Structure formats: C-alpha cells, structure tokens
Amino acid sequence: MPLVDIQLIEGVFDTSQKQDMIRKVTDAMVAIEGEAMRGVTWVRVHELPGGNWAIGGKSLSAADVKGMQRKSA
Amino acid sequence: MPLVDIQLIEGVFDTSQKQDMIRKVTDAMVAIEGEAMRGVTWVRVHELPGGNWAIGGKSLSAADVKGMQRKSA
Amino acid sequence: MPLVDIQLIEGVFDTSQKQDMIRKVTDAMVAIEGEAMRGVTWVRVHELPGGNWAIGGKSLSAADVKGMQRKSA
Amino acid sequence: MPLVDIQLIEGVFDTSQKQDMIRKVTDAMVAIEGEAMRGVTWVRVHELPGGNWAIGGKSLSAADVKGMQRKSA
Amino acid sequence: MPLVDIQLIEGVFDTSQKQDMIRKVTDAMVAIEGEAMRGVTWVRVHELPGGNWAIGGKSLSAADVKGMQRKSA
Amino acid sequence: MPLVDIQLIEGVFDTSQKQDMIRKVTDAMVAIEGEAMRGVTWVRVHELPGGNWAIGGKSLSAADVKGMQRKSA
C-alpha cells in the first residue's frame, strides 16, 4: 500500500519513458505518504493494444495518440 | 489515455492529501507525455476499507499504515 | 466470460439508470457474442466518490458531471 | 467518465466484433447519460489468453467458449 | 508480486469469512510460489453493493447469493 | 460471484503452476462460500511483462523474482 496502476496504449511510449513514469509517480506518492512507505509503494504499467481503447466510440491507435501529442496544449 | 488508478487504504490520507496525489501524479505523467495530453490524462483514487488489504496474509488497518509511516525510512 | 465493468462517479445516476445500463450493455454484448452466452455475461457497476476522479488534474464532482450533461452535445 | 472495461478471452472475437462491441456499448451508455457525455465516454477491450480464465476451477480455452456459443440459448 | 484481488457482493460474507479468504488464498499462493514470497504476496477484498453485479442482465442482491448458497451443489 | 484476479509477473510461473493456482484458489474460496457456488466462482490469471511492476520505484524482472524465491523465508 499504496498501489498505482498506470494504463497506456501500446506503442506510444518507449521503455525508458515507462521507467521514467514509474520513478516519477513513485516519487510523487512518496512525497505525500512519507519516505518510510517507499518499500511498500507498488507502481505498475499496463499497456493495451492500439484499437482497444476508445473515446466517444472512436478507437485510438498509437499513431492517433502521437498526433494528439504533437498538437500544442 | 493515459489512465492512472491510485489505490489506498481508507483513513490514512485526508482529502487534501488525495487531491495533492491527483495533481502531482497528473503532473508527473504530463511531464513525460507532453502538455497536450493533459486534457485526456485521467487520475482516480480508490480507497479500500482497513482490514481488506493484506500483506503476507496479515490485514492492514489504517492505524497499521500510520505506524509504518512513522518508522524512519 | 465476458465481464464488463462500468465505472461511474457516485451521485450522477440513480438506481434505475444503473439497472438500465446493466440491461442495455448486457444486450449489446449478447447481440454480438450470441444469446447462448447470456448466462455467462457478467456486468458490474462501480461508483467512485465525487472528487476521486480527475481529468487533467481537475477533480470532478457529481455536480460537475451533471453540468457537463446539460451542455448540448 | 464513464469508463467501461470489456474483458474477453483472446481468440473468440475478431477485430470487427470487438470494434462493434465498443460502438454498441458506447451507444448504450450515451443513450442513458446523454449525448453531451459522448466525448468523455471511454470504452476499452481487454483480452486474456485462453487458459487464464476459469469458471468453477476449469480453465476456458477460446475453443471452449466457441463451443458454448454454438449451444442454443 | 503477486497481487490477488477477491471481489464479492456486499452483505454475503462476514468479517471473519473475509479474513479467512485472505489467509486461505495467501496460503494457496505461497504453497506454489514459495514461503520466501509471503512478505510480497498481497491479497485484497473488494465488495460491490448488491444490485451492482449482474449475471445475464439480472442484478444479484446479497439475498439472491445466499439463496444460491443454500442450493445443494 | 465471486471473482478472483491473480496478478503475476510474466516468466516466473509456468503453465502448470498457474493452473495449480487457479485450482487451489478456487478450492480455497469454495471452502468458505460453499460447494453450491463453485459454478459461479471465476478465477483469472493476469501476467504483466517484467519491468512493468515496480516496488519502491525499482522495476522487477522475472529473474529478480526468481532470486527472491530462492532466498529462505
């Protein structure tokens, strides 16, 4: 405790980005729960194939998400 | 996409700490995926009653976790 | 098999709407998988307290969602 | 919000059936929550390998499920 | 690792039965993974309100499940 | 009902061990809920790739877990 599950579409992030997410999210949690909890802070990354994640009925591919990323915020 | 599920034991963190987790974890993800993705970055907090989360067969209460927090890292 | 998990924010939908979701989603699945599968088609509704579900770092209350519902599509 | 997770055994449904599930389940939800919510209605399809999903301790293969489908309702 | 999530309908099992599930499931896992893994074997119990879990489109109440339990196997 | 989800790191357990987990966990649940419930007791095994499951910010590989298994309890 705690457990954090990060869920992504496959093919958008590379291994180093996913490891970066694990570290940054772990640190974000530990900053609040306390350093003593680091050893029981679990973070997991789950990836779903492109096409299996839809918004408003429209399935997203990895390419769709990368297109979204390029748009300015 | 992405979706992040934070899972906690009830009674350990107060509302402002949970909101802080949401903001910090969102920012951690956006720092990697890009600001353009903020609007489709979902973060949720789930709480399980004390006694329903066990490590090694021993159920943890909120008080147990607070005891763990006080131990030095 | 299959299992469908519907996840909502508490306080937005009443009991009859949730039961309607269960029936409509079950029928949508059975229309594709075949009537013979109805008996092993499980549908569940999970509700998360308002404030525990955030989009872009902003937590949504039931009132926020009802406000979204009123906006024209 | 809402989020709907459809969970299946791999190898039972083809891509077009899975896309059909996404559309039909999205429409079933939108019919209840309102068209204004379509843009924040997420539907995902998760597939588990055959043999990893058991009923009563008996693991189901894709072929088992297809056999179930052929039985009259 | 591993993590086991037990999901029940609220009101069917009392606290001691749920604790019994945690212990028995933990022991079942440790018997296979090895005693050294006991300290990183997490088991959680999640309960869903009656009416929110449907089989074949029919929502189950705690009373329904207790009725099922009484039927001979 | 009930549903039990067993979550593992890929490459640590072979098929027969996973089937053994399914049987043993099913029996553990049925011993408490009653034999009449066996037919509606679902147990599933989910596997996450090595490197996608972290404890304290350190990602675990299958080899890491096997190393943990060899340590005496």
Image: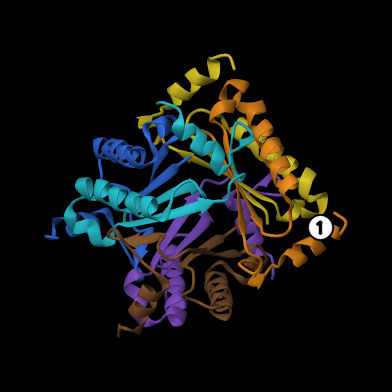
Chain colours: A blue, B cyan, C brown, D purple, E orange, F yellow
Residue pushed farthest right? E72
The front one of C57 and F47 is C57
Quadrant of the rendered structure where residue E49 is? Answer: bottom right
Task: Please indicate whether residue D24 sits to the left or right of residue C3 in the image.
Answer: left
The front one of A27 and B18 is B18
At horizontal 71% and vertical 67% (from top left) the residue drawn is E61
Task: Please indicate whether residue C56 sits to the left or right of residue C2 in the image.
Answer: left
Image position, residue D23 (x, y; %) = 41, 72
Image position, residue E2 (x, y; %) = 54, 34
Image position, residue F58 (x, y; %) = 36, 29
Q: Residues within 10 Å of mark 1 (few under 14, many from 20)?
A: some
Quadrant of the rendered structure where residue E27 is? Answer: top right
* Image quarter (top left, top right, bottom left or bottom right) of the C terminus of chain E: bottom right
- Which residue is under mark 1? E69
**Which structural element holds mark 1?**
helix
At horizontal 45% and vertical 34% (from top left) the residue drawn is B69
Quadrant of the rendered structure where residue D20 is? Answer: bottom left
At horizontal 32% and vertical 51% (from top left) the residue drawn is B20
Q: Is residue A29 visible?
A: yes
The front one of A9 and B49 is B49
Q: Is residue C58 above or below residue F21?
A: below
Q: Is residue B37 above or below residue D54?
A: below
Which amino acid type corresponds to the residue marked 1 in the rendered image? Gln
Image position, residue C8 (x, y; %) = 47, 67
Q: Is residue E3 visible?
A: no
At horizontal 75% and vertical 62% (from top left) the residue drawn is E65
